[in-house]
Image: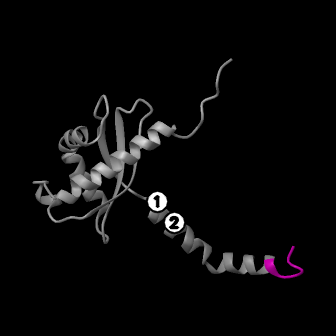
């Protein structure tokens, strides 16, 4: 009997991802990065996704208060070795995962959907549907 594999991450991946997110936030809050591109930049770590074997992680980041998320991710990826070492010290795992940073696009996508829902055509269609005879 073969078990069908679920589509989403396992509980262990979720737990490890959240532990890594907390550790990254602490490392970033210490402000020990020497890279001038990252000096004084406050980072929001929205999520950390971990591979099934826990050897790779992707951290989704945004500059706190707005800014160029792509440039932020590039700068953080440049310091990925430093973060891997810091995560190895902070989180009890057999192997420290390699870390990759990506800009979090979820908020931009949510704004786009919100804007679409407020567009005149959609508002008109929703109003028509809510009329007693609107079917």
Residue 115, percent from left and from top: 55, 74
Residue 79 against residue 116 in the figure, above or below: above
Residue placed at 18% from the left, 47% from the top? 79
Quadrant including the N terminus:
top right
In depth, the one of 116 and 59 nearer the eye is 59
Residue 105, percent from left and from top: 42, 59
Q: Residue furthest top?
A: 1
Image: magenta residue range? 130-135
* Residue 110: mark in rendering: 2
Residue 46 against residue 92 in the figure, above or below: below
Residue placed at 64% from the left, 24% from the top? 3
Residue 61, percent from left and from top: 34, 56
The rendered magenta stretch, by its main secondary structure, is classed as loop
* Residue 106: mark in rendering: 1
**Position of residue 3 in the picture relative to residue 101 (left or right):** right
Residue 75 against residue 1 in the figure, above or below: below
Residue placed at 64% from the left, 28% from the top? 4
In depth, the one of 121 and 7 nearer the eye is 7
In depth, the one of 88 and 52 nearer the eye is 88
The secondary element bearing badge 2 is classed as helix
Residue placed at 67% from the left, 75% from the top? 122
Residue 126, percent from left and from top: 73, 76
Residue 116 within the segment the image draws in magenta: no
Q: Quadrant of residue 2?
A: top right
Give yes or no for contact between labels 1 and 2 (Cβ–Cβ under 8 Å): yes
**Position of residue 132 in the picture relative to residue 124 (left or right):** right
In depth, the one of 27 and 115 nearer the eye is 27
Residue 132 within the segment the image draws in magenta: yes
User: Between marks 1 and 2, how big is the CA–CA gap?
Assistant: 6 Å
**Position of residue 118 in the picture relative to residue 112 (left or right):** right
């Amino acid at each position: 009997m073969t078990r069908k594999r679920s589509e989403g991450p396992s509980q262990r991946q979720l737990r490890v991802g959240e532990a890594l997110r907390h550790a990254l936030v602490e490392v970033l809050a210490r402000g020990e990065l020497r890279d001038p591109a990252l000096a004084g930049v406050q980072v929001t770590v929205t999520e950390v996704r971990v591979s099934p074997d826990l050897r790779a992680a992707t951290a989704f980041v945004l500059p706190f208060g707005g800014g160029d998320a792509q440039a932020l991710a590039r700068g953080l990826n440049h310091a990925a070795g430093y973060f891997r070492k810091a995560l190895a010290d902070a989180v009890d795992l057999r192997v420290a995962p390699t870390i990759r940073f990506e800009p979090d696009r979820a908020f931009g996508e949510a704004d786009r959907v919100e804007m679409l829902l407020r567009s005149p055509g959609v508002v008109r269609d929703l109003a028509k549907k809510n009329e007693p005879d609107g079917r």
